[in-house]
Image (cartoon, rainbow, N blue to C red):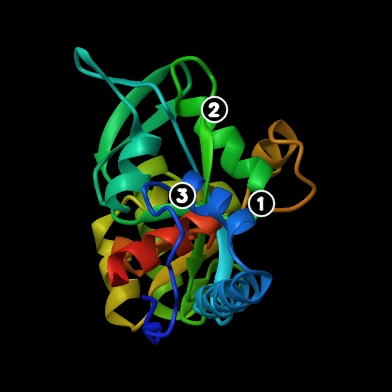
């Protein structure tokens, strides 16, 4: 996402570009004026990097480092950081049993502790990790004001599934509804990019979070994994531009 003006007037004489560490060490061996020029460029690029997130909402995703899939253990967190988010199989829990579904979106939270809770819950050793993300949340379907045809279809689906005659959707119903293609497709076709719903009281208590919402995002490619612009980032760009 970043586009920078390529600096062409840097004097890198006497600077060891072997690694980021040797690059930093070289700063003590060059004139102060040159250090100031490099530092100003670093600050400018860092500001440009951070600006890409200014209009996006910060959200969190909890992912396991060690999760058993068949006869293999996968580092789901590492795969997401390396390759980005993808729609894969998802594991759901009912009582003491689990079952697999085809995920129709990516689950994110505005609560870091809730994201950590879900990451821990899906890790075989209970030690998940949190990924910080940025997302455009301007066109989400807000379940708290669910009405019209979408709400009617949701009620119809949940009543048929549970054998009930309820007239209003509960918070916990949305966790099941986001796995139903009929509802998700309708929401997408209406022009929404995801579904927003308040997290259940049970999850908030378990995660020790006073508040929290789930952001169910349809398109994985619209989720930007937040990165920090560091000295190492600056070094890599300078080296690339040599």
Discs 1/3, front: 3
Which residue, given by chain and number where applicable, does mark 2 sit on? 120
Specify the label residue 111 is tagged with: 1
Q: CA distance from mark 1 to mark 3?
A: 34 Å
- In the picture, the disc for residue 13 is none
State which tag comes first along the sequence, 3 or 2: 3
Instruction: Tell me how far mark 1 sits from mark 2, CA to CA.
Output: 14 Å
Image vertical order of residue 115 relative to residue 76, above or below:
below
Could you tell me residue 2's position as x and y percent? 39, 77
Q: Position of residue 62 (x, y in %)?
A: 51, 41
Q: Are the residues tagged 1 and 3 within 8 Å (C-beta)?
A: no
- Residue 165, given in percent of the width and then of the height, sits at 48, 53
Q: Name the one closer to the observer, 108 or 150.
A: 108
Q: Which mark is residue 20?
A: 3
Q: Earlier in the sequence, mark 1 or mark 3?
A: 3
Seen at 46% across and 81% down, the residue is 139
Q: For the residue carrying disc 3, how many other residues have a C-alpha within 10 Å: few (<14), some (14-19), or many (20+)?
A: some
Is 229 rendered above or below residue 165? below
Residue at 35% across, 69% down: 222
């Amino acid at each position: 996402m970043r586009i920078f003006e390529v600096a062409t007037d840097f004097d890198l004489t006497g600077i060891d570009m072997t690694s980021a560490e040797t690059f930093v060490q070289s700063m003590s061996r060059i004139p102060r004026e040159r250090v100031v020029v490099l530092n100003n460029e670093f600050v400018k690029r860092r500001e440009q990097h951070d600006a890409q997130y200014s209009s996006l909402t910060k959200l969190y995703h909890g992912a396991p480092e060690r999760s058993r899939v068949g006869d293999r253990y996968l580092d789901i967190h590492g795969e997401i950081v390396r390759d980005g988010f993808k729609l894969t199989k998802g594991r759901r829990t009912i009582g003491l049993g689990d079952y697999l579904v085809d995920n129709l979106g990516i689950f994110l939270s505005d609560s870091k502790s809730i994201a950590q809770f879900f990451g821990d819950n899906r890790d075989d050793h209970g030690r998940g990790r949190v990924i910080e993300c940025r997302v455009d949340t301007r066109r989400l379907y807000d379940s708290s004001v669910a009405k019209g045809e979408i709400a009617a279809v949701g009620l119809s689906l949940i009543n048929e599934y549970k054998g009930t005659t309820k007239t209003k959707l509960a918070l916990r119903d949305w966790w099941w509804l986001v796995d139903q293609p009929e509802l998700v497709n309708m929401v997408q076709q209406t022009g929404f990019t995801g579904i927003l719903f308040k997290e259940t009281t049970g999850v908030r208590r378990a995660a020790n979070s006073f508040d929290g919402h789930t952001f169910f995002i349809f398109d994985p490619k619209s989720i930007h994994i937040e990165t920090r612009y560091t000295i190492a980032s600056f070094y890599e760009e300078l080296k690339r531009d040599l």
